[in-house]
Image (cartoon, helix red, strand yellow):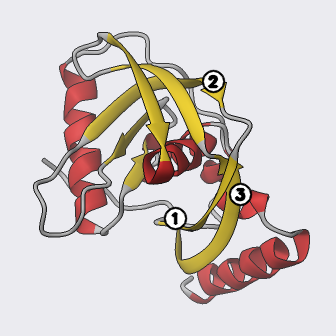
Amino acid sequence: MTIKPLIILPDPLLRQVSQPIERVDAAIRTLAEDMLETMYEAPGIGLAAIQVGIARRMLVIDISKEGDEREPLVFINPEIVRSSDERSVYEEGCLSIPDYYAEVERPAAITVKSLDREGREQLTEADGLLATCLQHEIDHLNGVLFIDHISRLKREMVIKKFTKASKSKL
């Protein structure tokens, strides 16, 4: 397994829409394992393939508590098929926007249709943190960042800060 470098804002790759995965094969399963290792190392609770530079529709999540047994989840070609009218607010962060957090309002419960790492269709009913995390990661697959859900002023400040930081590393 390989820990992959994370793509960080303002990299334009983060705004790219990811392409569907046609076949779940050994290479896709290896990518899922690499993504999980990368996420655990970061550390984070979710990671979309685009965040490691691969524009494919796959994400991994593990919302288990620190110290508990890991519960890795893999979602290939995830699609939200139902969203509740009820809303919830969580403070979100992102491995591609390190050390920045903001409250984001999203549907409180969702149903996601996807494939598992064996290529079998799965339907996942999610609420709470899992629902928020799934929506956050699926947004990534569509080129959307959590800062797109906050005020324009705050978003512009964050983008400016990360753009300046990336220029100073050159």
Q: Which residue is drawn at 66% across and 37% down?
A: 142
Q: Which residue is drawn at 48% across and 30% down?
A: 56
125 up-or-down from 34: above or below: above
Q: In the rendered structure, which amino acid carries the disc numbered 1? A: Ser
Q: In the rendered structure, which amino acid carries the disc numbered 3? A: Glu
Q: Residue beneath label 3, please?
A: 105
Residue 29's disc is none
Mark nearer the viewer, 1 or 3: 3
Element assignment for label 3: strand
Q: Residue beneath label 2, please?
A: 82
The mark nearer the N terminus, 1 or 3, is 1
Q: Picture coordinates of residue 11 (x, y %)?
A: 62, 61
Q: How crowded is mark 1: few (under 14 residues within 10 Å), some or many (20 or more)?
A: some
State the residue in front, 41 or 112: 112
Mark 1 and 3 residues: CB-CB less than 8 Å, in contact?
A: no
User: For the view shown, which residue lies furthest in the front direction?
Assistant: 86
Element assignment for label 2: strand
The mark nearer the N terminus, 3 or 2, is 2
Residue 96's disc is 1
Specify the quadrant of the image occupied by residue 119: top left
